[in-house]
Image (cartoon, rainbow, N blue to C red):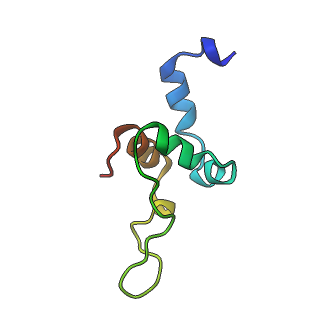
Amino acid sequence: RAAGTPDHEISSLLATVPPAALRRAGLLDTLLDLVGHPAAPAAPVDGTGTPGADGIEDMAVDELVRMALDGERD
């Protein structure tokens, strides 16, 4: 079934998967590795020792997919 699915449809479907679900399934690091992007820490620590606002958990799904596919973060 997956072999016949068009790439644009796969990309659209991936954009609907919550990052937490990818993480729970153990797929987030693999996805980031596939696109050559180093896995970012789930919640970077800022100077106060608290999770930073720019952490991966704060990103929208489309931002995560774009980051994974482009290897960049806006």
Q: Is residue 45 above or below residue 3?
A: below
Quadrant assignment, res 55: bottom left
In depth, the one of 8 and 35 nearer the eye is 35
Q: Position of residue 52 (x, y in %)?
A: 42, 74
Q: Is residue 47 above or below residue 69?
A: below
Quadrant assignment, res 4: top right
Q: Position of residue 71 (x, y in %)?
A: 35, 43
The residue at 40%/37% (across/down) is: 69
Left or right side of 38 for 1? right
Q: Is residue 48 above or below residue 39?
A: below
Q: Position of residue 42 (x, y in %)?
A: 51, 64
In depth, the one of 63 and 32 nearer the eye is 32
Quadrant assignment, res 3: top right
The residue at 35%/85% (across/down) is: 47
Q: Position of residue 67 (x, y in %)?
A: 39, 46
The residue at 59%/49% (across/down) is: 18
> How many labels, in total?
0
Quarter of the image where the N terminus is located: top right
Q: Is residue 60 above or below residue 7?
A: below
Which residue is situated farthest in the top direction here?
A: 4
